Image (cartoon, rainbow, N blue to C red):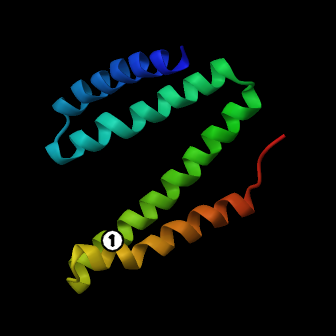
Amino acid sequence: MEYLIRFLAGGVVVSAFAMLADVIRPKSLAGLLSASPAVALVTLGIAFIGKDPTYASIEGRSMIFGSVALGLYSALVCHLLVRTQVSALTATIISLPVWLIVSLSLLALFPGGS
């Protein structure tokens, strides 16, 4: 039953974000805005309803840490692509450890749980 709710709620929220992203300029943001926030909100909502609030708060904290790490990773990839003009594969391989280190460091610096 949880999968059915997740499927339906995810579809509704992804559709709503896709409609919002359709009116936003530039269009390159449309894909980003239609998927990631919608899936995160649905997952967090299901965790809050189906589990205890502590579990949902840990999920939310992890999503925030992942977002920070992804932002730094993306900035580094863009910097490498524009400034050093390396290939996309090389920029990705170089930047991936940064994402891992940042995300694990945030988890270590701000431990959560009950």
* Left or right: residue 77 compared with residue 5: left
Q: Position of residue 33 (x, y in %)?
A: 31, 38
The secondary element bearing badge 1 is classed as: helix
Q: Is residue 60 above or below residue 101?
A: above
Q: Position of residue 102 (x, y in %)?
A: 57, 67
| Along the viewing direction, whichever of 20 and 100 lies nearer the viewer | 100
Task: Using a 10 Å C-alpha cutoff, classify the residue at mark 1 as few (fewer than 14 neighbours), some (14 to 19) or many (20 or more).
Answer: many
Q: Quadrant of the N terminus?
A: top right
In this rendering, the count of numbered labels is: 1
Q: Is residue 93 above or below residue 12?
A: below
* Left or right: residue 17 compared with residue 70: left
| Amino acid found under the numbered disc labelled 1 | Val
At x 37%, y 76%, the residue is 93
At x 42%, y 18%, the residue is 9
Q: Quadrant of the C terminus?
A: top right
Q: Position of residue 20 (x, y in %)?
A: 25, 27
Q: Check the image and name the residue furthest to the right.
A: 114
At x 24%, y 86%, the residue is 84
Q: Quadrant of residue 47?
A: top right
Q: Is residue 40 above or below residue 110?
A: above
Residue 85 visible to an observer of this rendering = yes
Q: Is residue 65 above or below residue 35?
A: below
Residue 26 visible to an observer of this rendering = no
Q: Quadrant of residue 95?
A: bottom left
At x 65%, y 61%, the residue is 106
Q: Position of residue 42 (x, y in %)?
A: 48, 26
Q: Which residue in the protein does label 1 denote? A: 77
* Left or right: residue 1 compared with residue 105: left
